[in-house]
Image (cartoon, rainbow, N blue to C red):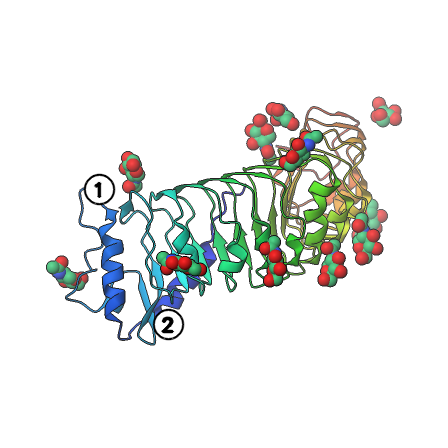
Amino acid sequence: MPGMSFLPRTIFTMIAIAFWGQAHCNGDEVGTLLAFKAELTGHGTVVLPSWNASTGLCNWEGVGCSSGHVVALTLPSYGPTAASLRPSETSRLRVLALKENNLSGVLPHSLYNLSLLKDFEVQENMLSGTIAADIGDRFPSIEILSFANNQFSGSIPASLSNISSLTMLGLHANSFSGYVPHDLGRLQGLIYLSLNDNKLEANDTHGWEFMTSLSNCSQLQFLVLRKNSYSGQLPSSIENLSSTLQALYLGDNRISGVIPSNIGNLVGLKTLEMANTSVPGVIPESIGQLRNLVELGIYNTSLSGLIPSSLGNLTSLNRLYAYYNNLEGPVPTSFGKLNNLDVLDLSTNQLNGSIPRGVKTF
Ligand SMILES: *[C@@H]1O[C@H](CO)[C@@H](O)[C@H](O)[C@H]1NC(C)=O
Ligand SMILES: *[C@@H]1O[C@H](CO)[C@@H](O)[C@H](O)[C@H]1NC(C)=O
Ligand SMILES: *[C@@H]1O[C@H](CO)[C@@H](O)[C@H](O)[C@H]1NC(C)=O
Ligand SMILES: *[C@@H]1O[C@H](CO)[C@@H](O)[C@H](O)[C@H]1NC(C)=O
Ligand SMILES: *[C@@H]1O[C@H](CO)[C@@H](O)[C@H](O)[C@H]1NC(C)=O
Ligand SMILES: *[C@@H]1O[C@H](CO)[C@@H](O)[C@H](O)[C@H]1NC(C)=O
Ligand SMILES: *[C@@H]1O[C@H](CO)[C@@H](O)[C@H](O)[C@H]1NC(C)=O
Ligand SMILES: *[C@@H]1O[C@H](CO)[C@@H](O)[C@H](O)[C@H]1NC(C)=O
Ligand SMILES: *[C@@H]1O[C@H](CO)[C@@H](O)[C@H](O)[C@H]1NC(C)=O
Ligand SMILES: *[C@@H]1O[C@H](CO)[C@@H](O)[C@H](O)[C@H]1NC(C)=O
Ligand SMILES: *[C@@H]1O[C@H](CO)[C@@H](O)[C@H](O)[C@H]1NC(C)=O
């Protein structure tokens, strides 16, 4: 289940630094970074020992340069710790990665002056406060934005929908509330969107508009919405999400509304999770088209009726959790084809008949 971070991008950052390294750096930037360092505190250790005036700035740990200027700053996780985050005024920064550094307090507004940023990551700290409403105007070229695993609150700024370069947006595990911007689907290059573990709401068609707009994100791969305060009818437009989508997590919300009959359109899905919701109705026949599905989590819902025999077509399926529902009738004989199944939990339903031949017993 998603405690997702941006592992691939961390690697991207390191490559970027290697590429930009080895250049002459500017004296003002030395002063700025030393001032930044002075704000950092270590726990009984010298903070960033390589950051000293006797060595070239571009050789400092976590500093990347291009054409004589600092363009990347990637602090090691749990290297220094800061009582509060103060900005460096290195206005040419393209990468600012400060994850896992025990940072607290609010993001200083001057930080939003780093208008060339492509990658801004502060996940896994203890930052709080709101995200600036005009972030979309301030960071017009941002590609990766991660605020995940902090204590941010307030609403998700509508201006984010204006950043057409955005590919990864990580907002999970905070206290964001209110509606998700209705036109978030204008982010046509979006690949990764995690909004889980917040207090986001959708209680009517207006609140759910964002989901319909995400149909326009033709490269979307991960969409994680679980554990929020979404309620009301899940829009059937989820069946129009991109066929590149690999993971869709909707669980732990007060969602009702049926699983759309064309859910089988989402042929890229490897994980589909709708657990702990009130989703009624039947499991659609078209689910048998999700040939790449590895994990299906539809437990503790209000699903009823027969299990479609098409489920037996999902030969990649490894884990099927469908307990605590109102499913009835027999387990389809087609389940005998599920050779990769390691977990099958159909307990607490009204199923009858016998276990089909070929189904592994556990
Ligand atoms: C400055 O950094 C260099 C390179 O890491 C290190 O060898 C040297 O001891 C440092 N000097 C001081 C005074 O900390
Ligand atoms: C984070 O900060 C807390 C209190 O400010 C401190 O107790 C803890 O040791 C710090 N963690 C790390 C890994 O530095
Ligand atoms: C940030 O930019 C604003 C104008 O957009 C300016 O007023 C402010 O002084 C700048 N802050 C810093 C710290 O550079
Ligand atoms: C998006 O950008 C347009 C054009 O710059 C601007 O008019 C609009 O106010 C922005 N939207 C938001 C929500 O900031
Ligand atoms: C629906 O959600 C919005 C946005 O959070 C909120 O302002 C409104 O009060 C909610 N309405 C109901 C009926 O819960
Ligand atoms: C997708 O984008 C097109 C063109 O920008 C727009 O007309 C349409 O309303 C969008 N669809 C959704 C579902 O937002
Ligand atoms: C899905 O998209 C098709 C084509 O744009 C449209 O006709 C259909 O109404 C959409 N389905 C839903 C449930 O929104
Ligand atoms: C469903 O609820 C149970 C019990 O509260 C919890 O342990 C589990 O993590 C939840 N699963 C999902 C997918 O939300
Ligand atoms: C079922 O989901 C509800 C929330 O919808 C949750 O309160 C409950 O703990 C869950 N039960 C189990 C057995 O997971
Ligand atoms: C999928 O499953 C259904 C029901 O078991 C079966 O009729 C159909 O032929 C299967 N489709 C494919 C392409 O295997
Ligand atoms: C199994 O359940 C189905 C649907 O509830 C019912 O029609 C059927 O008669 C039951 N079969 C047996 C053998 O109990």
Q: Which residue does the image show at 49% across and 54% down from the upper left?
A: 145
**Quadrant holding the N terminus:** top right
Q: Is residue 275 left or right of residue 332?
A: left
Q: Position of residue 117 (x, y in %)?
A: 44, 62
Q: Which residue is mark 1?
A: 43
The kind of residue on which mark 2 rests is Phe
Q: Which residue does the image show at 73% across and 50% down from the upper left?
A: 212
Find residue 235 and report its image quarter. Answer: top right
Q: Is residue 159 left or right of residue 68?
A: right
Frontmost residue, 105 versus 21:
105
Dot 2 or dot 1: first in sequence order is 2
**Quadrant holding the C terminus:** top right
Check the image and report above or below for 29 versus 261: below
Q: Position of residue 251 (x, y in %)?
A: 63, 36
Asked if the beta carbon under badge 1 is closer than 8 A to the nearest atom of ligand 2, the reply is yes
Q: Which residue is mark 2?
A: 19
Q: Position of residue 185 (x, y in %)?
A: 66, 55
